[in-house]
Structures are given as C-alpha cells and as structure tokens.
Amino acid sequence: MVTRYEDVVAILKDQRFVKDIRHALPPEVAEQVMSRSEARAIIRHHLLASDVPDHTRLRRLVSQVFTPRMSEQLRNSIQQITDDLLDRVQMQGQMDLITDFAFPLPLTVICDLLGIPGDHRQQFRAWSNAFFDRDVSFQGDSEEPAEIGAFVRYLKTLIIEKRERPDDRLVSQLVRAGELVTPFRRTSWWQ
C-alpha cells in the first residue's frame, strides 16, 4: 500500500505498473481469464483499468465532454443533492457518514450525469456494489456474479437508447463523440 503523495505520483508515472490485466499476466493466462465471459472482457476495458495508449484515448474522449464548463453547470445540482441528503439525516437526528452521505452523493451525481432514471438508481447502486465488491474475483477462477452480467446488459441497453434518443447527459454526449463503443467492439455482444 502506498500512502505518500510523492510515492503515488511516482507509481502513476511509472509504466512498469499496469492496470490492464492483459499487461499484468502472461498472455495465455490473461486470455483465459478474459474469455470466461463477455462481461469480464467488457468491464476490463474501462478507463480505470486501461493503460497507455488506450487510457490516453479514453481520457481524451471523456475530457472533450466533461469540461470545466460542464463541471460548473453541475454545481447547483450537486448542492441540491447535498442539501437533500443533509436534510434527511437532520430529520433522523443521527448520521452514518458513509451510508447516509459519502456513498449516495457521488452515486446520485453519477446517475444524473449518465442519465440513469430515478427508478433505476437503487438497482444501479446494487450493481455498482457487486462490481466493486467482487472485482478481485474477476482475476481468479471464481464464478462471475449474476449481477455483473445484468449490469453489462443494462449499460449496453443504455448506450443503445442514448444513441437512438440522445439527451444532454454524459452518455449521449460520448455517443455523439463517436468513441464510446470503441473498446467494446472487441466483444460479440455489441454487434
């Protein structure tokens, strides 16, 4: 575990440290792990699990859409979400910082950004929990949780929906940028 800022920066800049499982394992082992399911392959191609040059390309794409102007436009919405969360715990008279605030705040903001409808947010939260709680299992022989497959199917449907009926949310903007599905084209579910 690295905790000093200087050490973290040094590791992030050191190309010997990788996030992409294909670069961390021998090719035959990585292929075997990735080929166990489409969900594993798809999830392993996201921005946070990518190395240069894929990471650079994906980050550039997100940076085109997620601009300082967009961040500023989110200020009032984030303030309202924060106020609502704090009002709710004030009425309760007590607060669990993680459960009542630190987790729901970014989750709600992310769902707003992505255009996840309000009635889907609890399910999105459950899928997110399954993804992050079980991420280690994706590197072993353990069976893939059903939630992960459901999450991938939901994201696929969301991308298709935003392509057909774009709105002003982040997914629609990324689809309009024409790059969102590039890392997913390696898998059969997108065709």
Image: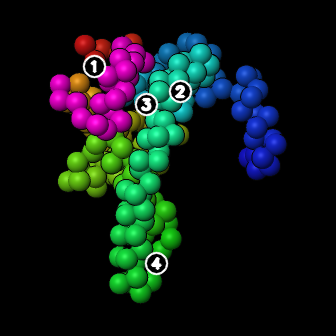
Which residue appears farthest toward the bottom when viewing the image? 93
CB under 8 Å between callouts 4 and 1? no
Going by the numbered disc 2, the residue's amino acid type is Arg
Amino acid carrying label 3: it is Val
Question: Which is nearer the N-term, disc 2 or disc 3?
Answer: 2
Instruction: Give the SS element for disc 1.
Output: helix
Q: CA gap, disc 2 to disc 3?
A: 10 Å
Q: Quadrant of residue 87?
A: bottom left
Comes first in the chain, label 3 or label 4: 3
Q: Is residue 182 magenta?
A: yes
Name the foreground residue: 160 vs 170: 170
Q: Which mark lies nearer to you, 3 or 4? A: 3
Of badges 2 and 1, the one in the foreground is 2
Look at the picture and state if 28 lies above or below 75: above
Q: As shown in the figure, which amino acid type bears the numbered disc 1? A: Trp
Evaluate whether residue 97 shows in this view: yes
* Residue that badge 2 annotates: 59
Residue name at image x 39 percent, y 18 percent: 179
Q: Position of residue 177 (x, y in %)?
A: 37, 21
Q: What range is drawn magenta here?
A: 164-185
Question: Mark 3 sits on what residue?
Answer: 65
Sort mark 2 into few (<14), some (14-19) or many (20+) by Cα contacts within 10 Å. Answer: some
Q: CA distance from mark 2 to mark 1?
A: 24 Å
Is residue 187 on the magenta stretch? no
- In space, the residues marked 3 and 4 are separated at their CA atoms by 35 Å
User: Label 1: how many residues lie within 10 Å, few (<14), some (14-19) or many (20+)?
Assistant: few
